[in-house]
Amino acid sequence: KSSEKGIFEHFMLKEIHEQPTVIRRIMKGYIHDSSININQSLLNDLKQSSRIYILAAGTSMHAGIVGKKIIEDLIKKPVEVHIASEFAYNTPLIDPNAFFILISQSGETADLRTCLTKLKKQDYKTLTITNVITSTLARESLYALEIFAGPEIAVASTKAYVAQIAMLFILAYALSDKAIDIQYELSKTAQAMENFLLSDSHIRDLVVKYINTKHAFYIGRGMDYATSLEAALKLKEISYIHTEGFAAGELKHGTIALIEDKTPVIAIISHESINLNTRSNLEETVSRGAIPIVITLESLKSDGDDIILEDVHPLLTPILTILPAQLIAYYASYELGYDIDKPRNLAKSVTVE
Ligand code: G6P
């Protein structure tokens, strides 16, 4: 049962290990004999819009940044991602032919409810992507899609994040004319996740080695930058180690000043096009004393890389590369003796602005 920990010591670890199943479950929900089962008028409205706006908060916002890249790649339509609390009161200029996607695990986040109220007054079309199909946002938006992650108990979101990305991939695929064997690609990703999760002991060893740090960085470019933001959020929210996720090429324009002797810098590298540049950015931090850690794919690996994942479809790498970061956060919090499932100052669902 999702409401019990079973063999796992914490809900977060259980939910991390559920992720391959969550991917398979969302496939069952939406893919039947390689055709996609999504409301046709939702697809038509998305097709007819000239610009898509994604609104979300926290981890769901990071899924939105990944989603922007997936949607722009598959359907060649511009996508903007906005932080819900900013959009609500500092609304940017909106394309009159806009379509809005709200992403929310709980479907109750107050910042998003404020956005939705305003959008509905102006008759914009809205879709909520959520884990709770009976939630306020799901009920009040024009369309809703359920991500089928099952109850997520740990405050730090893991399985909802990968399910949100998978949902955005399935939705974009439904609108795309690209030839992708979606069953095969998603199953392969689920299998790669499972294979990685079978042997996570080296992650714990890595964490133990570098746990005595005040600061840490995740760096990446493109999709790996989005993953870096989510990876950093995971580590800081449950281990209280100050962590920043940074665009690998932007670090040198100021923030590299924070690199001290033995600051862990974790580079995420999942695309050939950014491989060498990200590695040279990592080198720049090493020459200032940083300890480099590389998360990469089999096809891009170099001698001495720490965490190697199997290759999957290039638009699905974020579902896989986040796993080691979730485990790094989990074991860091574990080693430091914190309350992993209920970190200080945080709530699972934030219903105040
Ligand atoms: C809270 C949670 C985060 C979550 C965010 C958005 O701050 O602690 O984990 O990402 O809300 O929640 P939502 O339910 O809208 O995805």
Image (cartoon, grey):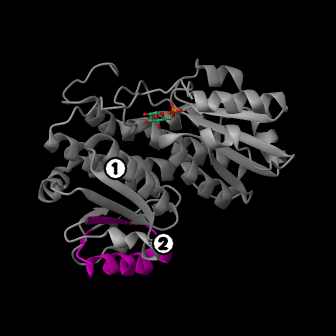
Left or right? Give the position of 147 relative to 244. Answer: right
Q: Against 66, is 8 above or below? A: above
* Amino acid beneath label 2: Glu
Nearer the observer, disc 2 or disc 1? 2
Q: Can residue 142 be seen from the camera position used here?
A: no
Q: Position of residue 192 (x, y in %)?
A: 35, 53
Q: Position of residue 202 (x, y in %)?
A: 16, 56
- Quarter that holds the C terminus: top right
Which residues make up the magenta segment? Answer: 264-292
Query: On the image, which quarter does residue 265 sit in?
Result: bottom left
Precedes in sequence: disc 2 or disc 1: 2
Residue 163 belongs to magenta span: no
Please give the residue where the numbered disc 1 appears in the rendered image. 323
Q: What element does badge 2 sit on?
A: loop
Query: On the image, which quarter does residue 302 sit in?
Result: bottom left
Q: Residue at x 48, y 39 (%)?
A: 163
Looking at the image, which is closer to me, 1 or 244? 244
Please give the residue where the numbered disc 2 appears in the rendered image. 250
Q: Against 343, is 315 above or below? A: below
Q: Position of residue 282 (x, y in %)?
A: 34, 75
Q: Residue at x 28, y 52 (%)?
A: 196
Q: Can residue 292 be seen from the camera position used here?
A: yes
Q: Residue at x 71, y 26 (%)?
A: 141
* Amino acid beneath label 1: Leu
